[in-house]
Image (tube, grey):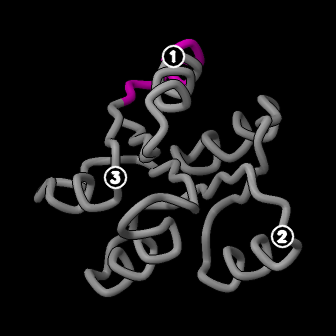
Amino acid sequence: MISIIDDDAAVREMLVSLVRSLGYDAVSFDSAESFLANEDFERFTCAITDIHMPGLSGFDLKERLDERKSLVPVIMITAQTEPDLEERARSQGVLGFMRKPLEIELLISYLKTAVGH
């Protein structure tokens, strides 16, 4: 099961639809807080999260997952163009980093890595 975390409903719906079309189950959350409130977040094969959201950011989410010793791989996405975002994401140990609009083939590659095939 892939989790989609984004404050933009249209982006969430698009990503859920895309991930499902690739043959994966998906569930969405409108914030990092709502994702973390789910006590069973370890059941997710991967978390795709926007970086810039009200409340906890994607970076904050990754820090919280690390604090909880989570093994859920994280793919960070953003529409922002700041050059240091990818470096910061990589330094946090994310599985992948993508800028919007998303490159579908790159997303497929990241998801295959996350699920182990």
| For discs 3 and 1, the disc positioned in front in the rendered view | 3
From the viewer's perspective, tell me whether residue 93 is left or right of residue 7.
right
Report the residue marked by disc 3. 31
Q: Amino acid at mark 1?
A: Ser
Give the image location of residue 94, x and y in percent: 61, 69
SS for dot 3: loop
Q: Circles 3 and 1: CB distance less than 8 Å?
A: no
The quadrant where residue 56 appears: bottom left
Residue found 44% across the figure and 29% down from its top: 9
Residue found 22% across the figure and 53% down from its top: 34
Whichever of labels 3 and 1 marks the residue nearer the N terminus, that label is 1
**Label 3 to label 1: alpha-carbon separation:** 18 Å
Q: Residues within 10 Å of mark 1 (few under 14, many from 20)?
A: some
Q: Which mark is residue 17?
A: 1
Give the image location of residue 115, x and y in percent: 51, 44
Report the residue marked by disc 2. 82
Q: Amino acid at mark 2?
A: Glu
Q: In the picture shown, does residue 60 fall above or below 48?
A: below
Residue found 38% across the figure and 25% down from its top: 25
Q: Quadrant of the C terminus?
A: top right
Q: Residues within 10 Å of mark 3 (few under 14, many from 20)?
A: many
SS for dot 1: helix
